[in-house]
Image (tube, rainbow, N blue to C red):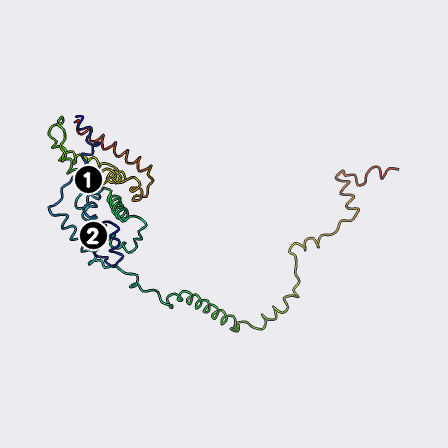
Amino acid sequence: MKENRDILENGVLRGRSGSVPSDYFDSLQRRLMAIPQDYPLIHEETVRKPGLWMRVRPYAALAASFALILAVGTVAMRRPLENVDDSTYEQLLFADMIPHMDPYSGDYQDETELSSDELLEYLICNNVQPYPQDLTAD
Amino acid sequence: MTDREILDIYRNGGQQRAFNEIVKAYSERLYWHVRSIVGSHDDTDDLLQDIFIKIWAALPSFRGEAQLFTWIWRIATNEALNFLKKNRRNSVSSIEDMSDAISRIPDENAPLDGDEAQRLLSVAVSKLPPVQRAVFSMRYYDELKYEEISDILGSSVSSLKASYHFAYEKVKDYLLKKISQ
């Protein structure tokens, strides 16, 4: 039993186990040596470098699209307005003369100003001394 | 032929001859390395084809920063581990095959002979998690240094030592348990 316990430490088992078909390794080597014929190497010189046009093409595409946008925009802006009559131009011409109104200002303008008597009456009715006592005293 | 000689042949235009020398030098060792990870012969056979195709395709980009041996082992180990990750079956068929062999161990008190013990060890190794299996295989069977395994797997030496220790203890426990049955 002690011999069994030492078996791993002694390295008796370091040999490989497992069944392999007869002459397997010879046939394996033959198959593997055929790989270069089946998969020829692609050498660097056989790989075509991209030409000048291929390198410039993205920039050319960008410039062309920019020019197209510019051309379409210019044509659209310079085209005369066909559906606009003279009254529209007149409205635009006199637009500055239309008074500008504060929507809330009218309310304040219509309100009448309080007279001093009304103000005094309001204060007295609300028990507020309209003038300090010492100023009215003799 | 040494790795350096193989690389010299390759750089001097003998690509195919260099590849053939790699096949001669490494195919059998790689077979056992991959088989110890994936388990079955058929899967190993398929994987070896893929591994050597990758080696052939990647040879032009090999710059010699690592050793040729380490570079080849890294490709093989990654392929084997990726295969296990994809399949998630951990070579059940091979474990079952091995279990038959275990049941034929004649006498529990008799010392194990080499073949039976090796089969038993294969079963124990196949029960390890994939990365521990790869570490155990490279350290125990291939007797690689931790530094070499570190280059291959990209793990630190200390984590590899821990991984191997756990794997070793698990395998030993399994063997002792099976032997004492």
Residue B136 to residue B178: above or below: below
* Figure quadrant of residue A51: bottom left
- Up the image or down, A104 lies above or below B128; here it is below
Residue B94, horizontal then vertical, whole percent: 17, 40
Q: In which quadrant will I find the C terminus of chain A?
A: top right
- Mark 1, Cα crowd under 10 Å, few <14 / some 14-19 / many 20+, is some
Quadrant in the picture for residue B127: top left
Contact, mark 2 vs mark 1 (Cβ under 8 Å): no
Left or right of B62, for residue B36: left
Which of marks 1 and 2 precedes in the sequence?
A: 2
Give the residue drawn at x 13%, y 42%.
A19
Which circle marks residue B21 in the picture? 2
Q: Residue type at mark 2: give it.
A: Glu
Quadrant housing residue B112:
top left
SS category of the residue bearing label 2 = helix
x%, y% of residue A82?
52, 73
User: In the current view of this chain or complex, which residue is farthest to the right?
Assistant: A138
Looking at the rendered structure, which numbered label has been put on residue B164?
Answer: none
Q: Residue at x 23, y 37 (%)?
A: B140
Task: State the residue in front, A65 or B145.
Answer: B145
Q: In the image, which disc is placed on residue B92?
A: 1
Query: Residue A56 vs residue A42: left or right?
Result: right
Image quarter in which the N terminus of chain A is found: top left
**Of helix, strand and loop, which one carries label 1?**
helix
Residue B134 in picture, x, y percent from top left: 25, 40
Few, some or many residues within 10 Å of mark 2 (<14, 14–19, 20+): many
Residue A104 x/y as whole percent: 65, 54
Q: Nearer the viewer, residue B102 or B18?
A: B18
Kind of residue at disc 1: Val
